[in-house]
Image (tube, helix red, strand yellow):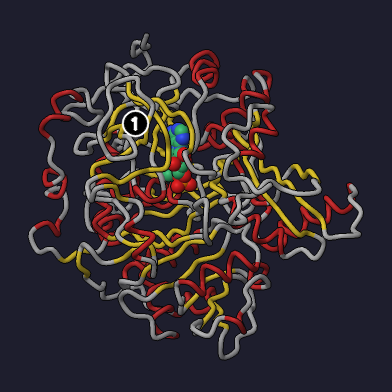
Amino acid sequence: MGIKITDRLTVVSGDHNLTNYDEKVGSFDWKETETAFSWHASGKVNAAYEAIDRHAESFRKNKAALFFDDGSRKEVYTFNDLKRFSNKAANVLKKHTTLEKGDRLFIFMPRSPELYFSLLGAIKMGVIVGPLFEAFMEGAVYDRLSDSEAKALVTTPDLLKRVPVEKLPHLEKIFVVGEQIEENDKIVDFTNQMKEASSTFDIEWVDREDGMLLHYTSGSTGSPKGVLHVHNAMIQHYQTAQWVLDLQEQDIFWCTADPGWVTGTAYGIFGPWLSGATNLIVGGRFSPENWYSAIERYGVTVWYSAPTAFRMLMGAGSSVLEQFDLSTLRHILSVGEPLNPEVVRWGMDELGHRIHDTWWMTETGGHIICNYPSMEIKPGSMGKPVPGIYASIVDDEGNEVPPYTMGNLAIRRGWPSMMREIWGNPERFNSYFLKEEWYVTGDSAYMDNEGYFWFQGRIDDVIMTAGERVGPFEVESKLLEHPDVIEAGVIGKPDPMRGEIIKAFIALREGVEESDQLAEDIRNFVKKGLAAHSAPREIEFKDKLPKTRSGKIMRRVLKAWELKLPTGDLSTMED
Ligand code: WT7
């Protein structure tokens, strides 16, 4: 049974919030969206122009585009301000580097206005931007900058300590955001240079298929892979910002994701700004008080967050919630992991709104299966495909299966925001596709008889912990670098708050004694080498790990041990 719509406060004309879903599904063509943009005739485009400058040259010139608040800095920027500051940033980057269209620049810093100026500025140059989450440690930073042969980096004095500059021969310049930076042949004081830079810039008009963003993400094998998105993705960011986020002129939109993850670029930057909405960006640490307070102080109307955060807010209880006035909220959405029906019910009871689940992934670049404001939602379901996208459940041969049959969640190739490359790895890219036709997501799901999709789990061993995607292989490889570890197998263990937590099974080198101290030391080793969110919360020592005859750790068996389930077919296991 679905739930009737009761929480729509504003009704707008047209199909803004997709009231005519069924009709659209049959007839919609993405070409209709293109005509919203100035470039659809010429073909020459720049997504940063469309997101910012276009509005700065319109009636929205002095409209607030960005409210920034990290506790210490509280700043407001209009569309015209963002145009000028991103132009300045582009001039600074251009003056000090040989960066050209298609070259890679990384941004490694916590959310700050400068992050957004430099990201937009680099895109105005036609440069491909790789945003890095601030929690990354040296190994993770090195992997990404070296794999993509990045020429430039924007960072802060603190995070600069985690950049192995001498091991990155392609890195020409590092722009440091802060006060009184000591410059040398590699280091440029970004903040100081911004003061002098011109606020006009000749935008590099690129082809719609030219690269724009490079988001690294994890799979079950191999090191993290660079997922390349192109300027054309804006078509989907814009359209889904209307249909799914339901963004309207007067909205104050808050996406809680960091731009280090794809949600933080597609819907933390492009969706809202392409729509001309006001975007709230909140830095600093999560706390229920800070978050509720942000909604109250900024009058947030549309809020996009993740199940882990909702579960933590739920856990904080109504006594915290009651201290805040959240009456401006109109529409709430979730992404990243399964949204528990219990959380949907909490949203209705406590926030007075249904939380709308959305399903997509780094590789899809934009929304794929969603719950729309005008649609009945079934708590626990991811919703229905975005019009213009054909999603289905297929078997391992690529044949579509009937409703209620579990299988591979697959999408027919060719939506606007689909990744165009895995950086430097065409084989890996091709391995996503089945019969040329289907993009296979790695998730298992089924569809019901009304066309709603229900998530079942990952088919591979990828771990989703607190909404972050962690590849077990990457963690295992880091564990093996620890001098006392001889074998390591890593799984996701179900956890009521975080979805899954990382659990490592470890065999120690001969003669090494297991202890809590050692477990702690190993955990810190991963924290320092990769990132805090990649470190195993639980470590269990074993004499030996289950392996195939070819020596591959059998994570499936580890998982069965953990869940006290039958281990299944062990015919490929050594002895
Ligand atoms: C994986 C992709 C792009 C959004 C952030 C995650 C899981 C994502 C849902 C959802 C159940 C979900 C899937 C997917 N996932 N959204 N609504 N319900 N699972 O992007 O890091 O590329 O991870 O996240 O397993 O494959 P990502």
Q: Is residue 488 above or below residue 207?
A: above
Mark 1 element type: strand
Taking the image as shown, residue 177 lies to the left or right of residue 398, namely right
Q: Residue at x 73, y 43 (%)?
A: 537
Q: Residue at x 63, y 77 (%)?
A: 164
- Compare residues 37 and 497 and report the one nearer the observer: 497
Question: Residue 526: horizontal and vertical position, in percent?
Answer: 71, 57
Quadrant of the drawing holding the N terminus: top left
Taking the image as shown, residue 90 lies to the left or right of residue 340, namely left
- Compare residues 150 and 8 and report the one nearer the observer: 150
- Compare residues 531 and 89 and report the one nearer the observer: 531
The answer to whether residue 334 shows anywhere in this view is: no
Q: Is residue 429 above or below residue 564?
A: below
Q: Is residue 141 above or below residue 381?
A: below
Q: Residue at x 78, y 52 (%)?
A: 507
Taking the image as shown, residue 364 lies to the left or right of residue 482, namely left
Question: Residue 432: horizontal and vertical position, in percent?
Answer: 35, 51
Q: Which residue is mark 1?
A: 370
Mark 1 C-beta closer than 8 Å to ligand 1: no
Question: Residue 377: horizontal and vertical position, in percent?
Answer: 36, 18
Crowdedness of circle 1 by 10 Å Cα count: few (<14), some, many (20+)?
A: many
Q: Quadrant of ligand 1?
A: top left
Quadrant housing residue 561: top right
Q: Is residue 105 above or below residue 546?
A: below
- Compare residues 213 and 113 and report the one nearer the observer: 213
For badge 1, the amino acid type reads Cys
Question: Residue 88: horizontal and vertical position, in percent?
Answer: 40, 73
Q: Residue at x 13, y 36 (%)?
A: 28
